Structure formats: C-alpha cells, structure tokens
C-alpha cells in the first residue's frame, strides 16, 4: 500500500493581520510550512502534495523542489483543499493518504508514526487528537462511548459540545478510496459556507471504522493562527532546540534567554551566555564563548574564540580571536587566529591577520591587515570616494598611531609606523614613520585676554 501525503498551506491567516502568508511566518528561522513538509518527509511517503492559495508564489519559493505544488484558487475550506490535492494525485484507491496542516511546526515524527501504525486494514480514517485545557478555536471530537462518530467545528458547536476538551488537530490518515468518496458527499451548509474536512469523519464513521490517536501533549499540536500563537510555538521550539544542544554538551547560562535557529551547528563545549541570538548558517566550534548580548548571523566562530556584546553578520572569527564588547562585524570580515576587534569597532570586508588588533573606536573597511599589527584608537580606512570603494593594505608588525586616516587606495609596508592624527594619502615604505600633521602653534596669554573682553549685553 502506497502512502501519499497532503500538506494544507493555502490559508490566509486573517487573524495575523499581515501581508505575509501565514505559513511563511517563521519559527526558529524557518517558515511554518517547511516544518510541516519535514515531518511528513520523515514518513517516507511516495508523494507529497502541498496545497497553496494565499500568497501562492511566495509560498512556492519556500518549498523544496521534490514536493508537488497545487493551487487552491478559492479558499473554500479544508475539505475543498483536499479535493484539489486529490485531483492532482489521480487515483488514490488502495493508498493511504496522510493529511497535515501547514501551520503546526511542533508536530513530531513519532506521533505521525503512531497514527500510521494505528491505521490498519479496514480502517477508513485515523485522526490525531489532543486533550487541551482551553479548546477554543478547535473542532471538538464527538464520541459515542469509545467510538469516534464525528468532529464539530467550534462555530457550529452547541454549548454542550463546546465544553468538550478533546479536539481534532487537522492531522489524519485516510483510506484513499473512502476519502475520495466521502468528499463527494459533504456540503458547505455551515456558518462558514466552506467544505470542512472534519465532516468527512462523520461521513466515514457511520459505515466504516474511525480511530483516534492521542498526541504526545497539547504543545505538540499547537496551530498558528495569530501572533501570540506564533510566539508560543517559537518558545516551545526554542526549548526543544536548546534542550537538544545542552544534551549534546553545550552550556547555557539561561536557556529561556538563548535563541538558536534550526540551521545553527554547535560543537560540544560551546558556552552561551544570556540574551544571545544565533541564526542562519552559523557554526560555533568547541570552547567558544558567546554573549552576553551577542547577535550572530551566517557566521563561523572558531575554537576558544570570545564574542560578547557584538553583532556579527557573515563574518569568520578564528581560533582564540576576541570580538567586543560593542563591536560590529559586517559581511566579509575574516579574523585570523588570535586577532582582536574591540570596543566600538566596525569592520567590513576586512581580513585581519594573526594576532593583529583593532582595539578601540575604529572603522576598518575593504582592508587587508597582516600579522602582529596594532591599529590605534580612532583610526579609519577612508575607503569610499563617493563613487567607488577602494582597498587598503596594511602589512605585518605595523603600528598605526591613534586617529590615523588611511585614504584608500593606499598601502602601509611591513614594520611601518604612522604618527597620531595623520591623514595618509600615499603609500608608506616598509620600516618608515609617516607623519602628516600641521605645525602646532601656541598663543601665550590667550586666557587672560579672553577674561578682559567686555561681555556682550543681551539684546
């Protein structure tokens, strides 16, 4: 028997009040719909069909190539969405059809496996359910004894039915032939004027067998229909991610204030202090210490490096290098082993050699710095002439005096020095001292003369 899968991702999510399609809102750095596709993929289905609608083109771009994408031009309910998917699938007689929502990022493979295991020979449908303290917004599972006889959507439920705390969570396995036949029977005579997939359960329960499997817990089946639910799902996912990393040997000062996206890779022995955010394609090697207050995106951080009170975007920090406090590393920054970017320093397209330091109050952009070089406080590479960017080359063992302005393109040779307050516009030969400074003048008695001046009357 083949397994076919449908992911429902066509809804607008009106309660989000956002121009972004609901299933493209992110949890742990990934769109909601990609979490759904991943958990379905873990079941090794023969086919995955994703139904898109609102913001269809944007949703398409977020989906992997191996899925089949179909468009629901009018969002006429979940039942109609499955009709559209089945039309694309063709004949599903004899197949099992797994249906999951595209807005439930916390669904676990174990629950889907249990659902598939329960769905045996002769079973028309098996649904995932959960008992929740507040069932508001969910369809209520209607039972006759232990037998599931239907699902009632909240807007169509009476007061007694609304008190039921066992809810359906839009996750099902159907016998393909029974599903196709039942979909032809359901109608849209409800308060939403939509074709409910939940009505299929009632249609199948009378002549056939419907089973239910309980989810691991209410948090697993949390759907996202509003920003507060998105935040709750993100918090739960963060706990999962942080828990896995701590079990793998990563130390966290405060997991509740540590934000690690799904694409991040950490080695055992990493230490993360509070209020640190790590996202994108970031890797952190053993012994590195991040935070407090580090914001790291698409960067690599080497063994025993130290990053704190800093922003890193597309940067590479070498072994034992130091970043911060209050540093900003922009894309293209590469720090070699033992180098330092210190307090109130910004870098961009900067290659900083081994053991070289940019300790204070400097901007280094479009620059290559050799090894064992020291950049004095307040120094700047003047790399932009208003039309083009130009490169600066600084050699090995260079000592830049404080407040040195390097007007690119310019090259500072090995072992060279610059005087404090100099504006360097020409190349400096190796081993030389370059000073560009006006002669200091002193006007003696100036303070006394100022005191003798008659104050100007107001008005």
Image (cartoon, rainbow, N blue to C red):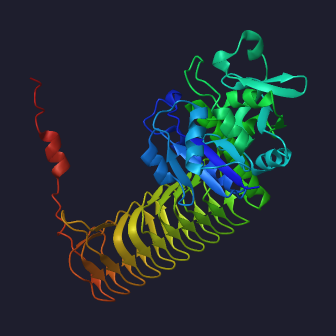
Q: Is residue 350 above or below residue 280?
A: below
| Residue extending farthest right | 145
**Image side of residue 159 versus residue 33, left or right:** right
Q: Residue at x 10, y 34 (%)?
A: 454
The image position of residue 316, as x and y in percent, is: 51, 69
Q: Is residue 376 visible?
A: no
Horizontal side of 452 relative to 397 (left or right) equals: left
Q: Which quarter of the rendered picture does the C terminus lie within?
A: top left
> Between 90 and 343, which is closer to the camera in this rendering?
90
Instruction: Count every numbered label the image shows and give the total.
Output: 0
449 or 66, which is in the foreground? 66
Q: Based on the displayed image, in which of its 4 quarters is residue 206 positioned?
A: top right
The answer to whether residue 44 is above or below residue 183 is: below
Horizontal side, residue 114 vs residue 65: left or right: right
Q: Give the image location of residue 163, x and y in percent.
A: 77, 16
Q: Is residue 14 visible?
A: yes
- The percent coordinates of residue 191 (x first, y second) are 58, 16
- In the depicted view, which residue is nearer to us: 286 or 20? 20
Q: Residue at x 82, y 44 (%)?
A: 119
Q: Quadrant of the N terminus?
A: bottom right
- Residue at the spot 65% in from the left edge and 66% down from the top edge: 288
Q: Residue furthest top?
A: 159
Tell which of 96 and 394 is nearer to you: 96
Query: Vertical placement of 17 versus 292: above or below?
Result: above
């Amino acid at each position: 028997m083949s397994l076919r899968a449908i992911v429902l991702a066509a809804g607008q999510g009106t309660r989000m009040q956002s121009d972004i399609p609901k299933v493209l809102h992110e949890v742990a750095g990934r769109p909601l719909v990609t979490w759904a596709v991943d958990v379905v993929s873990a079941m090794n289905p023969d086919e995955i069909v994703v139904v898109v609608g609102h913001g269809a083109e944007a949703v398409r771009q977020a989906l992997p190539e191996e899925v089949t994408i179909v468009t629901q031009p009018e969002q006429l309910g979940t039942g109609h969405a499955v009709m559209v998917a089945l039309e694309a699938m063709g004949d599903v007689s004899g197949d099992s059809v797994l249906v999951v929502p595209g807005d439930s990022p916390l669904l676990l493979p174990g629950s889907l496996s249990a659902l598939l295991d329960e769905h045996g020979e002769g079973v028309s449908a098996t649904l995932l359910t959960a008992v929740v303290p507040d069932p508001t917004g969910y369809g209520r599972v209607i039972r006759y004894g232990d037998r599931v006889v239907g699902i009632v959507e909240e807007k169509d439920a009476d007061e007694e039915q609304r008190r039921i705390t066992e809810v359906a969570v839009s996750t099902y396995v159907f016998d393909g032939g029974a599903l196709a036949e039942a979909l032809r029977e359901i109608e849209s005579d409800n308060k939403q004027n939509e074709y409910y997939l939940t009505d299929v359960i009632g249609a199948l329960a009378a002549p056939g067998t419907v089973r239910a499997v309980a989810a691991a817990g209410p948090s697993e089946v949390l759907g996202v229909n509003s920003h507060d639910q998105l935040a709750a799902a993100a918090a739960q996912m963060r706990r999962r991610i942080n828990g896995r990393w701590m079990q793998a040997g990563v130390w966290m000062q405060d997991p509740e204030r540590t934000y690690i996206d799904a694409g991040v890779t950490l080695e055992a022995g990493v230490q993360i202090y509070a209020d640190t955010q790590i996202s994108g394609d970031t890797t952190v090697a053993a012994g590195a210490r991040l935070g407090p207050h580090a914001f790291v995106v698409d960067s690599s951080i080497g063994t025993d490096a130290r990053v704190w009170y800093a922003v890193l975007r597309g940067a590479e920090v070498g072994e034992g290098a130091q970043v911060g406090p209050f540093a900003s590393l922009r894309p293209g920054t590469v720090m070699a082993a033992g180098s330092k970017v210190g307090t109130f320093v910004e870098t961009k397209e900067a290659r900083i050699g081994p053991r070289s330091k940019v300790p204070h109050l400097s901007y280094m952009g479009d620059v290559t710095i050799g090894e064992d070089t020291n950049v004095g406080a307040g120094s700047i590479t003047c790399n932009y002439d208003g039309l083009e960017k130009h490169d600066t080359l600084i050699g090995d063992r260079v000592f830049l005096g404080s407040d040195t302005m390097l007007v690119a393109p310019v090259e500072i040779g090995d072992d060279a020095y610059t005087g404090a307050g100099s504006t360097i516009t020409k190349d400096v030969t190796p081993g030389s001292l370059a000073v560009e400074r006006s002669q200091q003048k002193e006007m003696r008695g100036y303070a006394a003369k100022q005191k003798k001046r008659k104050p100007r009357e107001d008005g």
